[in-house]
Amino acid sequence: MTKTLRTTVTFLEMHAKPALYHIAPPLKNYALLRAEKPPVHFYRYLYHMVGRDYAWVSRKRMPDDALIELIHHPRVEIYVLYAAGVPAGYFELDFRNMPDVDLAFFGLFPDFSGIGLG
C-alpha cells in the first residue's frame, strides 16, 4: 500500500528592494562564506540540518551525481553562515534563469534559530 503525503510548497517573490530603516550593529565572530563546489556529503549535512524539521526531502532523494551536477553548476551559489567557527545555516541562489534569481533554499540550524541571525 502506497501512502500519499500532502505537501505545501511556498514561493516568495520580491519586486523591489526593501526600505532599510535600521542598520544593525556588525556581528562579531560570524562569517558568511561561499561554499565553492562543496562535497556532496557537506551539502547533504547542511540540507538535513536546516530542513529536518520541515520535511525537506527533494535533495535527499536525489542521486549523488545529479546533486553534484546541480550544486557545482557555475550559476548556482551556496553560502554558509558560520557562528563561532561552526556552520549555523545556509542559503542557495540559482542564477540559471536570469534575470530571475531563485532563492532555492534558506534556513538556520535549529540551535541558531530565534537569535536574530536570519
Image: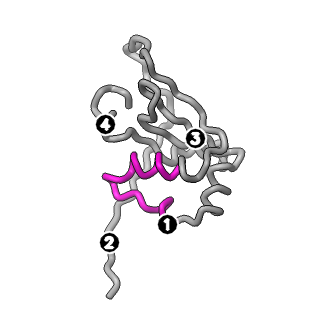
Task: Please state, as top left, top right, bottom left or bottom right, where the C terminus lies in the image.
Answer: top left
Q: CA distance from mark 2 to mark 1?
A: 15 Å
Relative to residue 39, is residue 83 drawn left or right?
left
Give the residue at x 61% y 44%.
38
Query: Crowding near pointer 1: few (<14 within 10 Å), some, many (20+)?
Result: few
Residue drawn where x is 51% and y is 48% of the image: 104
Mark 4 residue type: Asp
Q: Which mark is residue 5?
A: 2
| Disc 1/disc 3 C-alpha distance (Å) | 19 Å
* Image color mode: one colour
* Residue to which mark 3 is pinned: 78
Q: Which residue is mark 1?
A: 61
Task: Determine which of the numbered discs, if any, sits on residue 29 in the image.
Answer: none
Tag nearer the camera, 4 or 3: 4
Q: Position of residue 61 (x, y in %)?
A: 49, 66
Tags 1 and 3 in contact by the CB under 8 Å rule? no
Looking at the rendering, the stretch of residues picked out in magenta corresponds to 43-61
Residue found 59% across the figure and 43% down from its top: 101
The amino acid pointed to by label 2 is Leu
Q: Which residue is mark 4?
A: 111
Under mark 3, the amino acid is Ile
